[in-house]
Amino acid sequence: DKCNDKSKAQTEMNQSQSQGYQHRLEGFQRQSEEKERPCGQVARSHYYTERPYGQSERSHYHSERFHVHAKRSHDHAKRSK
């Protein structure tokens, strides 16, 4: 019967994942609507931080990496002048 419980848990996990996917889909749609205005970026990162299970840390890491990248390219632009 343990096996049965496991498959039930698996199903529930899949359901929650597909719900998360749906959330992401809505987020992306909202994001494309917000592309016109620059503050859409803020809303997007806010949307990601609200998401549970480790996703928020990932987006935080991602934005930090982006920050570093932007800084580096800025320095590069200064040097190439």
Image (spheres, rainbow, N blue to C red):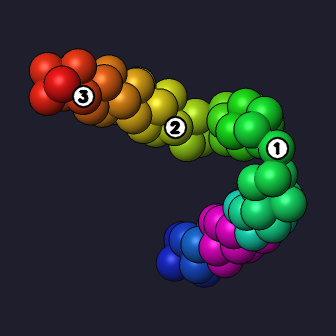
Find the distance from the CA under tag 3 to the CA under tag 1: 26 Å
Residue plotted at (55% across, 42% down): 55
Q: Left or right: where does residue 1 sit relative to residue 48? A: left
Task: Label 3, secondary structure: give it.
Answer: helix
Whichever of labels 2 and 3 marks the residue nearer the N terminus, that label is: 2
In the rendered view, tell whether residue 72 sits above or below residue 13: above
Q: Residue 77 at what x, y percent from top left?
A: 24, 28
Task: Label 2, secondary structure: give it.
Answer: helix
In the rendered view, tell whether residue 26 sits above or below residue 60: below
Whichever of labels 3 and 1 marks the residue nearer the N terminus, that label is: 1
Find the distance from the CA under tag 2 to the CA under tag 3: 26 Å
Which quadrant of the figure has residue 29? bottom right
Q: Which residue corresponds to mark 2? A: 59
Residue plotted at (40% across, 25% down): 67
Residue plotted at (18% across, 25% down): 81
Q: Which residue corresponds to mark 3? A: 77
Question: Mark 1 touching mark 2, by CB under 8 A?
Answer: no
Q: Left or right: where does residue 40 sit relative to residue 64? A: right
Instruction: Report the front residue among 50 and 75.
Output: 75
Q: Nearer the viewer, mark 1 or mark 2?
A: 1
